[in-house]
Image: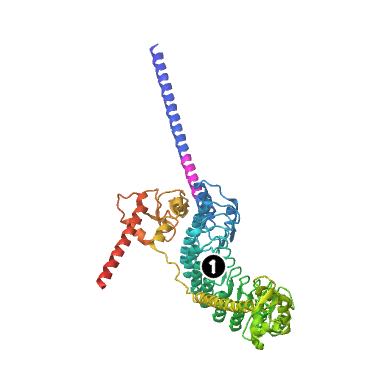
């Protein structure tokens, strides 16, 4: 019995041992399976990270050269809906966005795409209802894109802020060749900034400033810029308010210009003064080939001066001078000037101006010498057409007195001839019959007029006293009128002389106050700069490779951008994040402002920064006045 029990114990012991070994083996199997599961997770994570890296690489490669990813990310950060038309046209050479209805946010997002786009060569934003602040991001975006050479902002409103931005872009860029500012409501102030940029630009070849409000002051500044520029070849100034001194300023600038080939001045008001300046311009200019001065109030007096200048010109090929009050003699003088052997004119446009057979005869003679065409308003062999000077009819009493003096008859002798009964008075009928008898060359209507005017008492007869006093008073009034006309003519000549002596002023020079104004012009869109900066390339190392990530558009941190376009080092901010910094503003701050903000006291808050700058400027002005007064006292 004891043996059996011991055997059972041993069997039980063996059984327990085997079960323990099975459990251990199961635990080992479970641990091995868990290790295999962890390894699979790590492999999956590595595959996902590699896919993300590859996706970012592909995204960067797709975005590079087009910028559509930058545009979509910018729209997402600005909470606006991307415009499909923009995304579709970003890969094209030209982007035509007329009548799209873009807003300020769309302009900012589109400016972000410029940082990476290398396809666009022309951008057309015609009639989008944009203001100057809306256009500033687009204009400043041209600095980062050297491929866009043509820009059209027509039928928008540039305003002073946009004009100042265009001034800076024209000064700094060398790749913009075509600029369309037609119908942008440019006034004299805006034109000053455009002229300042044009004067310092060497790349613009085509400029359209038509359908604007450019007046006298803007025209003179623009004339100075035209005289200094060396790259501009085509300029359109039609449908403006260019007249008097402004017209003379434009034409004087054209005298000094050596590059302009095509100039359109139609639908302005050159007038007689402009015609006088035009003679000198055509005589001095040696590069203009196509010139349009149609509908400019050039009358029969001014066209003769234009013809004199055309006779001395040897480069002009096309002259459009239609829709002006030009008479037959003026047309004939123009054709005779074009027939000169030195002239190179191939076409003269006299639209809405009738001509006669003599003008066409000269045109046929020119056609025999060289290629020549003419357009006109019809052939009329009569002088009763628009443009003929209407002579002022002389007074009948003046003609009677002049005739009597020429034949040697005195007033008293004439009255004695009329007064047959010697009663000292004659009837109106007898007076008229007597004038006819002595041979006064006047029609019956004028003779009745003379008799009626001399009969001031309205009694039907004329006495010797009335006749002598009437003649004497008429001669006195006539002399006064002659003196009045002579004074008026003298004043008109002095005014013309003053207009023709108009000097081209210096173009407006930017001051520190203007730079400060420009720096804060877009304070309402303070995040614009961060929008543009965030679309630049920031490189991050992932598994040994470099991939571009597009950071958040609304990032408030400023960064320093190196020459390669990537973020290299942080830059400290001089004010709170609510205040636009240099990288957050759409306008680069002036050097003087950057130096001042480094020394800004710590107790000055961001909201008081503008007030602090203006107080600093006032102190500088006061100190300058004190220095001037001290210097004057020392000199005394």
The quarter holding residue 396 reads bottom right
Seen in the picture, residue 626 relative to 557 is either above or below; the reply is below
Which secondary structure lies at badge 1? Answer: loop
Residue 527 colored magenta?
no
Q: How is the image coloured?
A: rainbow
Rendered location of residue 159, percent (x, y): 50, 58
| Mark 1 nearby-residue class (10 Å; few <14, some 14–19, many ≥20) | many
Tell which of 17 and 39 is nearer to you.
Answer: 39
Tell which of 79 and 346 is nearer to you.
Answer: 346
Judge left or right: residue 156 versus residue 407. left
The quarter holding residue 19 reads top left
Q: Residue at x 33, y 59 (%)?
A: 618
Q: Quadrant of the C terminus?
A: bottom left
Judge left or right: residue 559 versus residue 502. left
Q: Mark 1 points at which residue?
A: 177
Q: Quadrant of the N terminus?
A: top left
Q: Tag count in the figure?
A: 1
Which residue is most to the left?
A: 634
Tell which of 64 and 120 is nearer to you.
Answer: 120
Residues drawn in magenta: 40-53
Q: Can you see residue 174?
A: no
Seen in the picture, residue 584 relative to 3 is either above or below; the reply is below
The quarter holding residue 430 reads bottom right
Rendered location of residue 367, percent (x, y): 70, 82
Residue 51 colored magenta?
yes
Which residue is most to the bottom?
A: 408
Seen in the picture, residue 136 relative to 7 is either above or below; the reply is below
Rendered location of residue 342, percent (x, y): 61, 85
Rendered location of residue 246, percent (x, y): 52, 70
Seen in the picture, residue 18 relative to 590 is either above or below; the reply is above
Q: Residue at x 46, y 40 (%)?
A: 39
Which residue is most to the top?
A: 1
């Amino acid at each position: 019995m004891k043996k059996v029990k011991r055997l059972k114990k041993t069997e039980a012991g063996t059984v327990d041992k085997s079960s323990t070994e099975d459990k251990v083996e199961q635990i080992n199997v479970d641990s091995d399976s868990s290790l295999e599961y962890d390894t699979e997770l790590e492999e999956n994570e590595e595959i996902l990270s590699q896919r993300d890296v590859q996706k970012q690489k592909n995204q960067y490669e797709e975005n590079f050269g087009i910028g559509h990813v930058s545009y979509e990310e910018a729209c997402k950060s600005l909470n606006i809906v991307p415009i499909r038309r923009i995304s579709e046209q970003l890969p094209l050479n030209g982007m035509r966005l007329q009548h799209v209805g873009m807003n300020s946010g769309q302009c900012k997002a589109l400016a972000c795409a410029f940082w990476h786009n290398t396809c666009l060569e022309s951008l057309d934003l015609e009639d989008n209802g944009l203001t100057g602040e809306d256009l500033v991001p687009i204009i400043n975006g041209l600095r980062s894109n050297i491929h866009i050479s043509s820009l059209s902002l027509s039928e928008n409103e540039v305003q002073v802020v946009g004009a100042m931005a265009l001034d800076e872009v024209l000064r700094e860029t060398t790749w913009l060749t075509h600029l369309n500012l037609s119908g942008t409501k440019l006034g004299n102030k805006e034109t000053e900034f455009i002229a300042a940029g044009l004067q310092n630009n060497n790349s613009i070849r085509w400029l359209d400033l038509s359908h604007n409000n450019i007046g006298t002051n803007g025209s003179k500044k623009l004339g100075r810029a035209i005289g200094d520029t060396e790259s501009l070849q085509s300029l359109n100034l039609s449908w403006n308010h260019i007249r008097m001194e402004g017209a003379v300023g434009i034409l004087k600038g054209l005298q000094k210009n050596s590059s302009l080939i095509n100039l359109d001045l139609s639908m302005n008001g050159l007038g007689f003064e402009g015609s006088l300046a035009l003679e000198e311009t055509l005589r001095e200019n040696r590069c203009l080939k196509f010139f349009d001065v149609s509908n400019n109030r050039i009358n029969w007096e001014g066209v003769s001066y234009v013809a004199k200048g055309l006779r001395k010109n040897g480069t002009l090929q096309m002259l459009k001078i239609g829709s002006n009050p030009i008479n037959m003699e003026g047309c004939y003088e123009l054709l005779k000037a074009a027939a000169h052997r030195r002239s190179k004119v191939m076409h003269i446009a006299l639209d809405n101006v009738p001509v006669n057979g003599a003008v066409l005869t000269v045109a046929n003679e020119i056609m025999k010498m060289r290629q020549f065409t003419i357009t006109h308003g019809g052939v009329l062999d009569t002088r009763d057409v628009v443009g003929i000077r209407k002579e002022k009819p002389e007074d009948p009493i003046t003609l009677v007195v002049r005739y009597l003096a020429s034949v040697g008859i005195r007033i008293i002798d004439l009255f004695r001839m009329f007064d047959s009964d010697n009663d000292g008075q004659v009837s109106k009928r007898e007076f008229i019959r007597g004038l006819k008898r002595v041979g006064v060359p006047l029609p019956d209507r004028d003779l009745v007029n003379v008799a009626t005017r001399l009969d001031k008492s309205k009694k039907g007869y004329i006495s010797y006293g009335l006749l002598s006093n009437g003649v004497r008073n008429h001669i006195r009034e006539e002399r006064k009128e002659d003196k009045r006309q002579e004074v008026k003519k003298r004043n008109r000549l002095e005014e013309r002389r003053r207009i023709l002596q108009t000097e081209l002023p210096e173009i407006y020079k930017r001051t520190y106050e203007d730079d400060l104004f420009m720096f804060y012009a877009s304070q309402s869109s303070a995040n614009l700069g961060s929008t543009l900066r965030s679309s630049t390339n920031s490189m991050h190392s992932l598994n040994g490779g470099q991939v571009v990530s597009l950071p958040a558009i609304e990032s408030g941190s400023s960064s320093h951008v190196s020459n390669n376009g990537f973020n290299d080092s942080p830059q400290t901010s001089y004010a709170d994040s609510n205040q636009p910094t240099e990288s957050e503003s759409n306008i680069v701050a002036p050097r003087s402002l950057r130096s001042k903000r480094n020394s800004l006291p710590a107790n000055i808050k961001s909201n008081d920064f503008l007030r602090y700058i203006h107080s600093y400027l006032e102190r500088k002005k006061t100190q300058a006045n004190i220095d001037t007064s001290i210097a004057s006292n020392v000199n005394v």
